[in-house]
């Protein structure tokens, strides 16, 4: 129902635009040759996936890598874990050098 209303409005707008082009151009354009596709966005439950993966990790049901993969985030789990381990190593080195 709503799609028809939007398509009708888009066709009116395209009619005005092509009429304007036809005034200035030697090539005649027809707005009926343009196809209009309406793509509907479906809601995602990204927050729910992340919460579920985080809860499972906190309760010890999943490892770090599995939790990252189960969260649905578009990142590489191995690279992220390597970065975390590197940061932990850097933080431990900093603490050892400043507090000895």
Image (tube, rainbow, N blue to C red):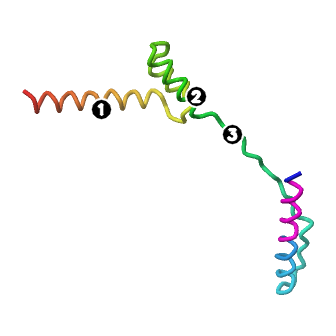
* Residue 59 placement, left or right of 44: left
Q: Is residue 4 magenta?
A: yes
Give the vertical position of 17 relative to 32 (above or below). Answer: below
The residue pinned by badge 1 equals 87
Relative image position of residue 14 (x, y in whole percent): 84, 70
Element marked by disc 1: helix
Query: Please, is residue 25 above or below residue 76 in the view?
Result: below
Q: Given contact means CB atoms under 8 Å apart, are the residues at marks 3 and 2 in contact?
A: no
Residue at 23% x, 31% y is 91
Please indicate whether residue 95 sits to the left or right of residue 19 in the image. Answer: left
- Give the residue number, with chain letter if any, for mark 3: 43
Q: Which residue is mark 2?
A: 49
Q: Main secondary structure of the magenta part?
A: helix
Image quadrant occupied by the C terminus: top left
Q: Is residue 59 left or right of residue 11?
A: left
Q: Which residues are magenta?
A: 3-13
Q: Give the alpha-carbon distance from disc 3 to disc 2, as whole Å.
A: 13 Å
Tag 2 or tag 3, which sits nearer the N-term?
3
């Amino acid at each position: 129902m709503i799609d028809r209303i939007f398509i009708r409005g888009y066709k009116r707008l395209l009619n005005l635009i092509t009429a304007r082009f036809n005034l200035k151009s030697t090539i005649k354009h027809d707005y009926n040759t343009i196809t209009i596709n309406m793509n509907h966005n479906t809601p995602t439950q990204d927050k729910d996936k992340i919460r579920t993966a985080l809860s499972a990790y906190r309760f010890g049901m999943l490892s770090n890598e599995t939790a990252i993969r189960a969260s649905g985030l578009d990142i590489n789990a191995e690279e992220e874990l390597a970065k975390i381990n590197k940061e932990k190593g850097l933080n431990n080195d900093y603490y050892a050098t400043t507090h000895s």
